[in-house]
Amino acid sequence: MKPAPFAYAKPRSLDEAIALLGTRSEPRLLAGGQSLLATLNMRLSAPRTLIDINGIAGLDRIARNGGTIEIGALMRHVQAERSAEIAQFAPLIARAIPHIAHPAIRNRGTIGGSIAFADPAAELPACLLALGGEVEIAGPSGKRSVKADDYFKGLYETALGPQDILTSIRIPAVTAQSRVGFAEFAMRRGDYAMVGLTATARADGKALTDVRLVYFGVGQTPIRAKKAEAALVRSDLDGAVAALATDLDPPDDIQATGKVKKYLAGVLLRRVARQLMEQPA
């Protein structure tokens, strides 16, 4: 199947792209296109205008500002995967990216595209939430920042407005006390995860503080398991696993029943908790 007909525009600046979003009929932004082109070809989406933002300079950079790492929206997954800065200062992102689809997808897919699309089974939205990061958004009224806790609204729904463009994400750089964990279950490497878990914490001697456990593939958005977080802070791993019974309510889908997903969530929690505890101080 081929896409429905559409117009094409390639702005050279953010202001031009924002203006086009307000003046073109049924527009969609094109970055890496690894989700959009598939839906176009299956006619699951049929925008009248594609606005290609790849010509806008400066949206594919990494910048470190004190304790923060800023990653431009147009950075390709493969760039982040090979980045020494991300490996050093954002190791959770570095752990997650090899699990995203396959090399051909990672060659074109973008960090910002994944966060903007907000697939609830995707790795990077969950990582952003686990890291307590934020997104930088440009729109008709200027730029604003939105914390990850406030960004994900529902199934493929975010804080982005109709004329907004996600320009970057900001996450805290790791410190000597930072701990991160990542694990997922997928039928095959590169498939969407049946269940995945991203985690961050701070080491306080042999204990953990500031624990954030974020599951993906178990709901309409990435989901924090807050009761399990509290139990893990108390060093009660069994209690944390038991708390998932109320923290999560995964629906049945074509990959697994909700009951199976909840069991797998507990298995992942034990694996990720081990990662958090075993990292060197």
Image: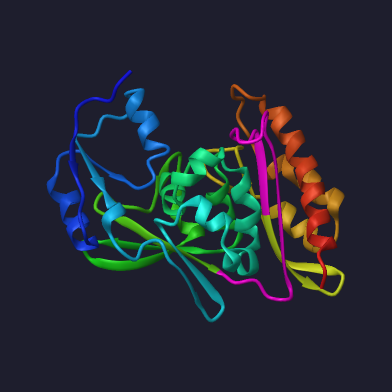
Instruction: Using the rendered image of the protein, determine whether residue 64 is visible from the camera's viewpoint.
Output: yes
Instruction: Identify the image's colour scheme: rainbow, by chain, secondary structure or one colour.
Output: rainbow
- 274 above or below 141? above
Q: Which residues are magenta?
A: 172-198
Q: Residue furthest left?
A: 23
Task: Give the left or right position of residue 114, taking residue 263 as reference.
Answer: left
Task: Give the left or right position of residue 31, taking residue 162 as reference.
Answer: right
Q: Position of residue 46 (x, y in %)?
A: 26, 29
Q: Residue at x 80, y 44 (%)?
A: 242
Q: Quadrant of residue 280?
A: bottom right
Q: Position of residue 76 (x, y in %)?
A: 46, 52
Pick the residue in front: 84 or 150. 84
Q: Position of residue 105 (x, y in %)?
A: 49, 40
Pick the residue in front: 136 or 232. 136
- Is residue 197 a member of the stretch shown in magenta? yes
Pick the residue in front: 45 or 150. 45
Task: Give the left or right position of residue 148, taking residue 209 as reference.
Answer: left
Q: Residue at x 54, y 50 (%)?
A: 124
Q: Residue at x 49, y 59 (%)?
A: 148
